[in-house]
Amino acid sequence: MAEKKKYTLMNTVAVLSVSTLLYLATINASSLAYMVKEFPQYDITTVKLFSTIPSLMMIVCSLLSGKLIQIFPIKKIVIGCASLMFAAGFGTYFVFNLPAILIMRVIYGMGSGTVFPLANAIIQQLYEGEEKARLLGFRAGFGALFGAAVTMVGGWLTSFGWRYAFFGYLFAIPVALLVLFCCPSNEPIKKENSTAKAGEKKYTKKTFYVLLFAVFFNACMMSFNVELSLVITGENIGGAGQVSMVASTNTIFAFIAGLIFGSLHKKTQRYMAVISTGLVGLALAILCFAQNFPLFIMCGAIFGLGFGFYNPTYNLLIAGTAAKPKFGSQAIAVYTSCVGLGQFLSPYLINGVKKLLNLNVLRAEWKITAVSTLCLVLGAVIYIIVTGGNKKASQA
């Protein structure tokens, strides 16, 4: 076991760099409102598919990644995914109709959906104990810092025209090179190590509670990103630059949350689920009434803290709910699919509630998700009381 911890600083940086690929799509954070104007012949829900299709692909591809790591080293899979994301992301610049753009997003989603669980799986495989928890926090922070940078770059590029944001996908190239030359090599995970024997349980009831929670919570969180550009530009609060500033604030504070997660996790491990969910709910609630740009910045900061705590908390939690440690990686893959399902279903679930309640008010999407998220906070409290929270997960 001691050999697994003998990694250089560049090895660790390369491992953490995998998480930057998860945030690469934030380069288009400011693009959606301009795409709605570019394609007026399509309804807004169809245009929103640009943001949600990668999440749909995550459902299938994250499960596929669980099979791929039994055949190929994670390092090679990551390089392949980065190449696919570059080709489809940058290639969209040369596409001029919405159906073709959405097809490119499907291809992009194949790469991003496959790599999504690998950012955690490679840490789970190479590190142990508190070092693993610390690096999972750093992973979220490292990716968020990158996300803040590309979001600002994306806003700047969008100021020249929304298509120019696709140049941001060039960032995938240095990430692929860093992984190629510096990421530690690993053998494919042997199938027999993660295969259930006859009558052997893979998951527990807690696993399914967390998976159900993930679907609805991610549907709520997705509304922050999808509606941000539409609200800020649509209500003349600002333009592409202001959208990117709020999105960057979000990712910067997610980075801060990742840095402090390791120490905070030791002291408040039973309550991290409530803390992370509550911060997201608070941000969405304030956004329902925010009328000036500084309030949007504040909400971006609060949301970022919640999101930054949420990622490592629930990855540790879901792995800890598996019936046996060897099924932890599979539980993470299923969880990732549920994350993608929630993100993809987000606009459809929200529109369904809007029609059901006949809500035709400003920012109805955020009002629905704010109330829903606060209900999930209550659910998380009940979960802690009934099951003991994530005490087991923290030891995974």
Image (tube, rainbow, N blue to C red):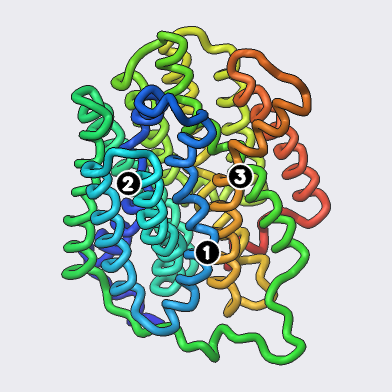
Q: Amino acid at mark 2?
A: Leu
Image side of residue 246 versus residue 332, left or right: left
Q: Residue 380: which disc?
A: none
Residue 113, quarter of picture: bottom left
**Where residue 317 appears, x then y in whole percent?**
61, 59
Q: Secondary structure at mark 3?
A: helix
Nearest the eye: 392 or 323: 323
Query: In the rendered image, is residue 163 in sight?
Result: yes
- Kindly indicate whether the residue at mark 1 contacts the one at mark 3 (C-beta within 8 angstroms): no
- The residue drawn where x is 23% and y is 54% is 172
**Where residue 265 appears, x then y in whole percent?**
54, 50
- The residue drawn where x is 66% and y is 64% is 392
Q: Which residue is mark 2?
A: 24
Cα–Cα span, label 2 and label 3: 21 Å
Cα–Cα span, label 3 and label 1: 14 Å
Cα–Cα span, label 2 and label 1: 20 Å
Nearest the eye: 103 or 335: 103
Of labels 2 and 1, earlier in sequence is 2
Q: Which residue is mark 3?
A: 345
Q: Secondary structure at mark 1?
A: helix
Q: Which residue is mark 1?
A: 60
Q: Amino acid at mark 3?
A: Leu
Of labels 3 and 1, earlier in sequence is 1
Mark 1: give few (<14), some (14-19) or many (20+) Cα within 10 Å: many
Query: In the rendered image, is residue 249 in sight?
Result: no
Image side of residue 59 versus residue 119, left or right: right
Quadrant occupied by the N terminus:
bottom left
